[in-house]
RNA sequence: UGUCCUGUGGUGUAAUUGGCAACACGUCUGAUUCUGGAUCAGAAGAGUUCAGGUUCGAAACCUGACAGGACAACCA
């Protein structure tokens, strides 16, 4: 079970409850459901999970934990045309990675196909369902529109006996796709479209990823979901707001099914939106399929696998989920909140290292040639237990090109001609010469160092304004560094009715820097290991890393107090 | 001219159920610092969509507007 981050359960219990937990607490106080709380996370295995699902996972598992209850993982696999085992596997991986465990409570809607069929027969026998042979277009037409009532199907009053025979034939494969459907007989004039004799079953002559060719009729979501909840003993069926208008139908089926006081209760909350990105499976699929990103795990995507590859930790994502809260208001959460969560987590835990992503060579003219010193560097100033390491220093070094300005502005207090700065953990240096090529570009700096400042402090107590990160040319490891920026230039790219999403694609969302260097201590790092490159940001090892090529992703930059 | 849902600083939420609108992110100061990070101290920023009403007292309750969203898939 995932522990609540950084706070004990006792404290967590005292945190203000969101409206769902409030409602559950009220139900419990009234003695409903025998004091039990049982939730479920019910993804359809038709794609990869994103951070919105992460919120749902945290909410479902977290709420159950809070009340000492349980959570099931259930795959909502009622549409064989879209679902694949590959997705089942990735979803399980992502849920586990986030730190949650469903123990032995793994279910599939397809586990219930027989029971759903039997229940459908019961409804037919009770005169509450019928087989309709009209075309999709006609049925749709008869349903009317939200502002106008629908009209009854001519098949609405077929006798139960005949309907049972027809439904049996449907199941037996006697009809073709589209020939007929099974509908619930409810109310064609209901103001709620979902109550106008909704479809329960359709014919799909497609193999199912679990049941193979056993079935050629498949239940619709609305017919399956509540019943699955009921059979699993789910007390609180938490879903997103778009299902709000489905609730009367959810309840209608449960009413036909239940034989005790117990009933699962559907509660809706607003889906998560994060600024500068998109969250719908359809749009994510488009970005992947049309090649605007490099796959579901592209680090620019808000998918769980993308964020994982980007360097986000499970802890940071759980913290984010707690932070955004749960309401029925639809809004857009600032991506800065997500970035805050990963910075806060990694600040406490990430190994510090020096990396230079845009190198400028400097020569310490008064430092002996051929000498390499090993200097002490602190692995994490936030955590003494992480200890120290050695970093090599020599006559030729790389510093960040950005850290030098030939004609410094007022606010720039890093290296410039004649100015003294500190190289982290080593010496004070002073810039004595600027070497340029024929184009006037700076190719190299000449500096001198003060041997009396070894370790980074002057014997005479003088101070410098800036401390720079650096690497020794001879020992630095070459690396490729991938810098990511927001995928879209608009905070709400999907929120424009008149404009296509793609108009807001950020052309600079990925920058690949190949001539970068890192210190030799990262040599044995493994994929996904997180580091802080001092003064630059948090970076992790990309799985593209090979023995020949080190590849880093920038998870997020450090907050930058220096504004140009 | 339908039904349902939702309106609280720039953003996300809270207000123990009718008692001085709080917290976080972000922004801006200052201190401190061998990361322009972190840390510490502080500031600005809403009077709760609007108009009525009930009440000693309303973000909350009532009425009516207005705004946004969901619903018309043999998707989930």
Image: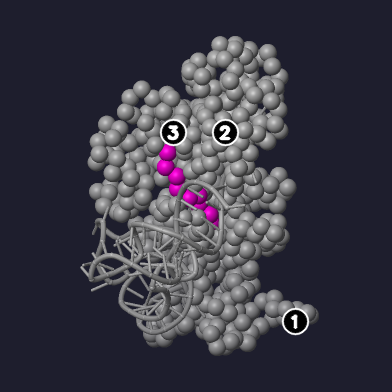
Q: Is residue A269 left or right of residue A70?
A: right
Which quarter of the picture shows residue A147?
top right
Q: Is residue B22 left or right of residue A232?
A: left
How far separated are the C-alphas under marks 3 and 2? 17 Å
- Name above or below for residue A186 compared with residue B19: above
Q: Position of residue A423 (x, y in %)?
A: 50, 74
Which dot marks residue A188? 2
| Residue A16 can be seen, yes or no | yes
Q: Are marks 3 and 1 on the same chain?
A: yes
Magenta-tinted stretch: A266-274
- Residue beneath label 1, please? A440
- Callout 1: few (<14), some (14-19), or many (20+) C-alpha neighbours within 10 Å? few
Q: Nearer the viewer, mark 3 or mark 2?
A: 2
- Callout 3: few (<14), some (14-19), or many (20+) C-alpha neighbours within 10 Å? some
Q: Mark 1: which secondary structure? A: loop
- Residue beneath label 3, please? A251
- Callout 2: few (<14), some (14-19), or many (20+) C-alpha neighbours within 10 Å? many
Q: Residue at x 69, y 47 (%)?
A: A286
Q: Position of residue A400 (x, y in %)?
A: 59, 71
Q: Chain of mark 3?
A: A
- Name above or below for residue A189 compared with residue A341: above
Q: Are marks 3 and 2 on the same chain?
A: yes
């Amino acid at each position: 079970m995932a522990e609540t981050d950084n706070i004990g359960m006792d404290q967590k219990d005292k945190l203000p409850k969101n409206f769902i937990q409030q409602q559950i607490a009220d139900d419990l106080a009234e003695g409903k459901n025998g004091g039990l709380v049982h939730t479920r996370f019910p993804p359809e295995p038709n794609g990869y999970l994103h951070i919105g699902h992460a919120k749902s996972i945290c909410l479902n598992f977290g709420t159950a934990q809070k009340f000492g209850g349980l959570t099931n993982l259930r795959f909502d696999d009622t549409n064989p045309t879209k679902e694949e085992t590959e997705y089942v596997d990735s979803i399980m991986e992502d849920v586990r990675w986030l730190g949650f465990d469903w123990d032995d409570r793994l279910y599939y809607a397809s586990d219930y196909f027989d029971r759903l069929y039997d229940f459908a027969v019961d409804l037919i026998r009770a005169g509450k369902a019928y087989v309709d042979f009209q075309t999709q277009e006609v049925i749709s037409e008869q349903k009317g529109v939200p502002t106008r009532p629908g009209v009854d199907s001519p098949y609405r009053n077929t006798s139960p006996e005949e309907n049972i025979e027809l439904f049996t034939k449907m199941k037996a494969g006697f009809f073709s796709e589209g020939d007929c459907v099974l509908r619930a007989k409810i109310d064609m004039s209901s103001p709620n479209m979902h109550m106008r004799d909704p479809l329960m079953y359709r014919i799909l002559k497609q193999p199912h990823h679990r049941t193979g060719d056993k079935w050629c009729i498949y239940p619709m979501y609305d017919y399956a979901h509540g019943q699955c909840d009921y059979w699993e003993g789910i007390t609180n069926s938490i879903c997103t707001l778009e299902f709000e208008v489905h609730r009367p139908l959810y309840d209608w089926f449960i009413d036909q099914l239940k034989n005790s006081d117990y009933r699962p209760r559907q509660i809706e909350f607003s889906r998560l939106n994060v600024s500068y990105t998109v969250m719908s499976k359809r749009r994510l699929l488009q970005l992947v399929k049309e090649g605007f990103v490099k796959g579901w795990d592209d680090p620019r995507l808000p998918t769980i696998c993308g964020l994982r590859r980007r360097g986000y930790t499970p802890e940071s994502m759980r913290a984010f989920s707690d932070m955004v809260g749960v309401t029925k208001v639809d809004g857009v959460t600032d991506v800065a909140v997500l970035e805050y969560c990963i910075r806060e987590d990694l600040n406490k835990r990430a190994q510090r290292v020096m990396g230079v992503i845009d190198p400028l060579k400097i020569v310490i003219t008064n430092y002996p040639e051929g000498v390499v010193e090993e200097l002490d560097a602190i692995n994490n100033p936030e955590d003494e237990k992480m200890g120290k390491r050695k970093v090599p220093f020599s006559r030729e070094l790389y510093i960040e090109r950005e850290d030098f300005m030939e004609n410094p502005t007022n606010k720039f207090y890093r290296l410039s001609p004649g100015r003294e700065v500190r190289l982290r953990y080593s010496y004070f240096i002073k810039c004595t010469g600027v070497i340029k090529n024929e184009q006037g570009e700076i190719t190299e700096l000449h500096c001198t160092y003060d041997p009396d400042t070894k370790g980074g402090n002057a014997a005479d107590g003088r101070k410098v304004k800036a401390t720079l990160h650096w690497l020794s040319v001879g020992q630095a490891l070459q690396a490729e560094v991938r810098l990511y920026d927001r995928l879209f230039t608009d905070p709400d790219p999907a929120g424009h009715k008149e404009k296509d999403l793609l108009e807001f694609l950020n052309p600079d969302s990925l920058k690949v820097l190949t001539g970068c260097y890192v210190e030799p201590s990262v040599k044995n790092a493994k994929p996904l290991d997180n580091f802080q490159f001092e003064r630059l940001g948090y970076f992790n090892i990309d799985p593209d890393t090979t023995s020949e090529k080190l590849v880093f992703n920038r998870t997020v930059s450090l907050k930058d107090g220096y504004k140009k």
